[in-house]
């Protein structure tokens, strides 16, 4: 018997799978191209908040079911109300989730299959790393419906050059996966059937490192971006001193000198 409309509605918005220190969060509205509805945003936020408190999880992968990664905000939901407060709350909810990706101590990798448009492209840009299939395409296409992608422009402008970002924002044009790689929006482009394996291989490389060093490093990296050069060096030096005082740094250096694999404690 085929699935009914109610069966589709009752499916969870987000699927979670944890294995070997890696949690995969899979957007699960493939028929709608996985829009960032308020419900999807709420599920992502809850999952990230849960993972932040789970020391057994070292890396997060954000993936998607179906032919698209994420088509951005749910335009039907956005037009369901004329209330300014409703729209403000939706954009604040989205910004909070994107900020959480940035602020959580665990690296977040986007596993991009198919299109990533508007807030979906924002999601890719907000992640620490991104692996894309060859068939993937990217756009910030709000301008095509009279809506400048202001919030997507925040992480986009921090990944791409200004002129590359503005070209995407002003034209709404799609770029292919190779162009996204050239622009710095993604880290790696692989064949469609190699996407999951390649993303997981990247995650496993990170899991093999010191969790303390990864956590300190990610937090330091984003904080120093907003500082002047001298302040950034001072802050980075202080963070590196803290890192050097850790058990993991002492173990890692000793292991290197002794030509053996380190045994990380996370301290």
Image (cartoon, helix red, strand yellow):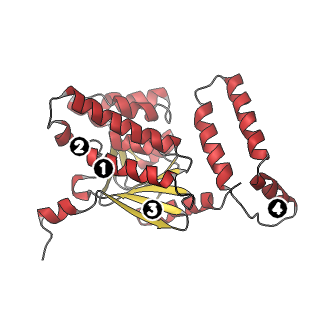
Of pointers 3 and 2, the one earlier in the residue sequence: 2
- As measured in the structure, the alpha-carbon distance from the residue carrying label 1 to the one carrying label 3 is 23 Å
Q: Nearer the viewer, mark 4 or mark 3?
A: 4
Q: Position of residue 56 (x, y in %)?
A: 56, 62
Does the CB distance between marks 1 and 2 fall below 8 Å?
Answer: yes
Of pointers 1 and 2, the one earlier in the residue sequence: 1
Q: Which residue is tagged 1?
A: 40
Name the foreground residue: 213 vs 256. 213
Does the CB distance between marks 4 and 3 fall below 8 Å?
Answer: no
Q: How many neighbours does mark 4 have within 10 angstroms: few (below 14), some (14-19), or many (20 or more)?
A: some
Of pointers 1 and 4, the one earlier in the residue sequence: 1
Determine the secondary structure under disc 4: helix
Work out whether residue 188 can be spotted: no
Q: Position of residue 123 (x, y in %)?
A: 40, 44
Determine the secondary structure under disc 2: loop
Q: Position of residue 254 (x, y in %)?
A: 85, 58
Q: Going by the image, does 22 lie left or right of 227?
A: left
Q: Nearer the viewer, mark 1 or mark 2?
A: 1
Of pointers 4 and 2, the one earlier in the residue sequence: 2
Q: In the displayed structure, would residue 145 be above or below residue 138?
A: above
Q: Which residue is tagged 4?
A: 255
Which quadrant is home to the C terminus? Answer: bottom right
Name the foreground residue: 113 vs 191. 113
Q: How many neighbours does mark 2 have within 10 angstroms: few (below 14), some (14-19), or many (20 or more)?
A: some
Q: Nearer the viewer, mark 3 or mark 2?
A: 2
Q: Going by the image, does 218 lie left or right of 259?
A: left
Determine the secondary structure under disc 1: helix
Of pointers 4 and 3, the one earlier in the residue sequence: 3
Residue 74's tag is 2
Quarter where residue 234 is shown: top right
- As measured in the structure, the alpha-carbon distance from the residue carrying label 4 to the one carrying label 3 is 33 Å
Query: Which residue corresponds to the image point at 76% horizontal and 50% vertical from the top-left?
Result: 246
């Amino acid at each position: 018997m085929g699935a009914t409309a109610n069966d589709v509605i009752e499916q969870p918005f987000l699927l979670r799978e944890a294995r070997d220190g890696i949690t995969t969060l899979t957007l699960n509205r493939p028929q709608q191209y996985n829009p960032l509805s308020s419900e999807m945003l709420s599920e992502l936020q809850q999952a990230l908040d849960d993972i932040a408190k789970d020391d057994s999880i070292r890396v997060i992968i954000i993936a998607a079911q179906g032919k698209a990664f994420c088509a951005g905000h749910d335009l039907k939901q956005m037009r369901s109300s004329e209330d300014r407060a409703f729209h403000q709350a939706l954009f604040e909810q989205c910004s909070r989730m994107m900020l959480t990706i940035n602020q959580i101590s665990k690296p977040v990798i986007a596993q991009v299959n198919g299109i990533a448009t508007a807030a979906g492209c924002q999601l890719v840009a907000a992640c620490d790393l991104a692996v894309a299939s060859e068939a993937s395409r990217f756009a910030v296409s709000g301008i095509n419906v009279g809506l400048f992608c202001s919030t997507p422009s925040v992480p986009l402008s921090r990944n791409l050059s200004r002129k590359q970002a503005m070209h995407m924002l002003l034209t709404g044009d799609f770029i292919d996966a190779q162009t996204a790689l050239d622009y710095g929006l993604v880290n790696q482009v692989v064949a469609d059937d190699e996407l999951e394996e390649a993303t997981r291989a990247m995650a496993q490389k990170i899991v093999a490192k010191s969790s303390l060093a990864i956590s300190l490093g990610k937090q330091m990296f984003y904080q120093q971006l907003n500082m002047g050069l001298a302040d950034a060096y001072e802050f980075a030096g202080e963070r590196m001193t803290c890192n050097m005082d850790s058990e993991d740094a002492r173990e890692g250096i000793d292991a290197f000198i002794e030509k053996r694999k380190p045994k990380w404690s996370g301290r």
